[in-house]
Amino acid sequence: MTIPFDIVGFDLDGTLLDTSRDLGVALNHALGTIGRPAVPYEQVRSLIGGGSGLMLHRALALTGGEEGIDFEALRLVLVQYYGANIAHHTALFPGGAEMLNQLEALGAKLAVVTNKPHHLAVRLFDELGLSHRFAAIIGGGTYPLKPAPDALHAMVEQCGGGRAAFVGDTTFDTRAAKAADMPCVAVSFGFIDAPAHQLGADAVIDHFDELVPALARL
């Protein structure tokens, strides 16, 4: 099997990595510092997407609103705690390692574009021993956040050019890919912010063993 892409880019949270448990612990730590109740773990997944600020806005809305809250100070509490406890529970989604091996065997360069702050994305991949697998890791802070296409264009440039596809789990990803004129695959097992088949992707997969065949069809 071959795929018509030189580069395959991935979102991080909810696409390559299930970060929900570590993000949930950090979120609830931050909420606890202002006396708010913890968000149940099963609800945390629905709050993730678009960066730490949006996750915190959603959590505050659930637990009493933002009146009287120093939002930026609280976001920093969340981010600092998360950065210090970033990889206790995080792992590739099922089939992820085999999928990366397949793509490398097919000659594709691998990349990550995430709204997670760049230094946290790099730290997480370093701690998981995965950084060496990616030709580019682009996190938030250098380019406008997805759904802006800038970071996806930078991904192609950093990987040396060529035809690229992007894999994500939310409308932030599919809209960024569309704006970058890049085919997109959505994963249904991520932190989706709409039903998977309504995200606007060119294909939807339910497990990573479906990714290479999906890319081959695009």
Image: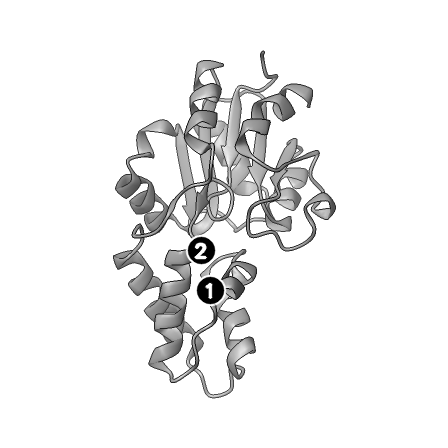
The quadrant where residue 149 appears: top right
Q: Which mark is residue 20?
A: 2
At label 1, which amino acid type do we have?
Tyr
- Indicate the secondary structure of the residue bearing disc 1: helix
Tell which residue pokes out farthest to the bottom in this image.
68
At label 2, which amino acid type do we have?
Ser
| Residue 202 position in % (x across, y down) | 70, 34
- Which one is in front in this view, the residue at disc 2 or the one at disc 1? 1
Q: Nearer the viewer, residue 134 or 62?
A: 62
The quadrant where residue 47 appears: bottom right
User: Which of the two discs, 2 and 1, labels the residue nearer the N terminus?
Assistant: 2
Quick check: 72 above or below 184?
A: below
Q: CA distance from mark 2 to mark 1?
A: 8 Å
Q: Nearer the viewer, residue 135 or 47?
A: 47
Residue at image mark 1: 41
| Residue 116 position in % (x across, y down) | 43, 52
Label 2–label 1 contact, CB within 8 A: yes
Quick check: 162 above or below 195?
A: above
**For the N terminus, which image quadrant?**
top right
Residue at (57% x, 23% y) in the render: 212
Left-right relation of 145 to 132: right
| Mark 2 nearby-residue class (10 Å; few <14, some 14–19, many ≥20) | many
Q: Which mark is residue 117?
A: none
